[in-house]
Image: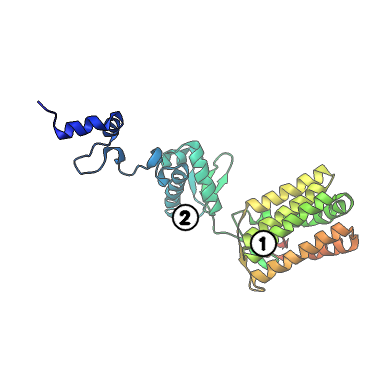
Amino acid sequence: MSASPERTARSQAGPEASERARSRPTPTEDGSSARSRRPAGSTRGGESPSRGSATGRAERAAERVTELIESVTPGSRLGTKEELRTLCEVSVGTFNEALRLLQARGLVTVKPGPGGGLFSAEQSPMVRLGNSVLALDAQANDVADAVRIRDALDPLLIEDALWHASPADIAGLRRHITAMEHAVGADAPVAFVHANWRLHAAVAAISPNALLSSLYTHLLDLIESHTLSVLPSSDQPLGEYIAHRHELHSDLVDALDRRDRDEALRLIHEHNTTLQTAEGSATSDG
C-alpha cells in the first residue's frame, strides 16, 4: 500500500517540523491558545495588580482609617496602633506606611503613654512665617517656641561658620541655594521651605560645637515634622515672598564665603525679624 501524500510530506519535512508541531499551543474551545490564557486579573510574570501591592494595601488601610475619622469629631481617640492595624487586617509594616500617609495628610496625630494612641487631628492651627503661613498639626505652640529658640541660635552658628566654613562647606551651602532657586522657579513653596531648612541644617553642621549643632538640628526637625503645608498670607503673594527669601539666603552664603562678618550678621538679623503667629504669639521667618 503506498503512503498518502500527507504522510509522505511529513516524513520529508524531517524531525524539526515534527518538533514544531509538538510544541505548537493547543487551541482551546473558545479558539484562544492555552499558553496565552491566564486567570482574570493576573498579569504577566505573576505580578499582582497595583491595588494588591504593598503600596496599594497601605492606601486601602489609610482609606479605612479615614472613614473612621470622618465618623468621629476632631480630636477623638481612634484606638491604639495595634487595634487599628487589626481593624485594617494588614501587617505591621503595611500599617506603619498607612500611618505615614495619614500623618502626611494631616488626618491623625499620635500620642504616647497611657491613654495614648491615634487621634483624629484637630483643625490645623497656623503659624505665621514671614509673609507665608505654615499649616501645622496640633503642636502650634511647640513650633512657635522652637522657631524663636532657633532664631536666637542663628547668630551663634553664623559666627562659627565665618570662622570654620571650608570651601567644600560653602559649595555644599550653594547646592542648597540652587535647590531653593529651583523651587522658586517651579512655584513650589513647600519644596522651598524644606530646601531652606536643609540649608540651615548644613550651616549648623559646620559648627565645631556639637551641643549647639545638635540642639539646632533638633529644633529644625521639630518644626519640619509638624508642618503640613505652606499657605499665602494676605500681605504679599507667596511667590514674591519666597523669591525674596531665596535672594536673602543667597546673599548670606556669599557673605560667609567672603568672611564678611558685618554683612552676615546684618542678613541673619533681617532673616530673623520677629513677626506674630496667627494666634498672636511670637515667631519668625524661615
225 horizontally vs 248: left or right: left
Marks 2 and 1, Cα distance to the nearest angstrom? Answer: 40 Å
Q: Secondary structure under badge 1?
A: helix
Q: Residue furthest left?
A: 1
Query: Considering only order in the chain, which callout, 1 or 2, is on the residue closer to the N terminus?
Result: 2
The residue under label 1 is 182
Q: Secondary structure under badge 2?
A: loop
Query: As rendered, which of 175 and 38 lies closer to the eye?
Result: 38
277 horizontally vs 89: left or right: right
* Residue 113 percent location from the top left of the image: 59, 39
Q: Which mark is residue 79?
A: none
* Residue 225 percent location from the top left of the image: 63, 50
Q: Eyeballing the image, is 80 above or below 228?
A: above
Report whether residue 189 is seen: yes
* Residue 131 percent location from the top left of the image: 68, 68
Report whether residue 144 is seen: no
- Front disc: 2 or 1: 1
117 horizontally vs 152: left or right: left
Residue at coordinates 78% horizontally, 57% vertically from top-left? 151
Q: Amino acid at mark 1?
A: His
Q: Quadrant of the N terminus?
A: top left
Q: Amino acid at mark 2?
A: Thr
Residue at coordinates 70% horizontally, 68% vertically from top-left? 243
Q: Residue furthest bottom?
A: 235
Query: As rendered, which of 282 and 22 lies closer to the eye?
Result: 22
Q: Quadrant of the C terminus?
A: bottom right
* Residue 136 percent location from the top left of the image: 61, 57
Q: Which mark is residue 73?
A: 2
Badge 2: residue crowd in 10 Å (few <14, some 14–19, many ≥20): few
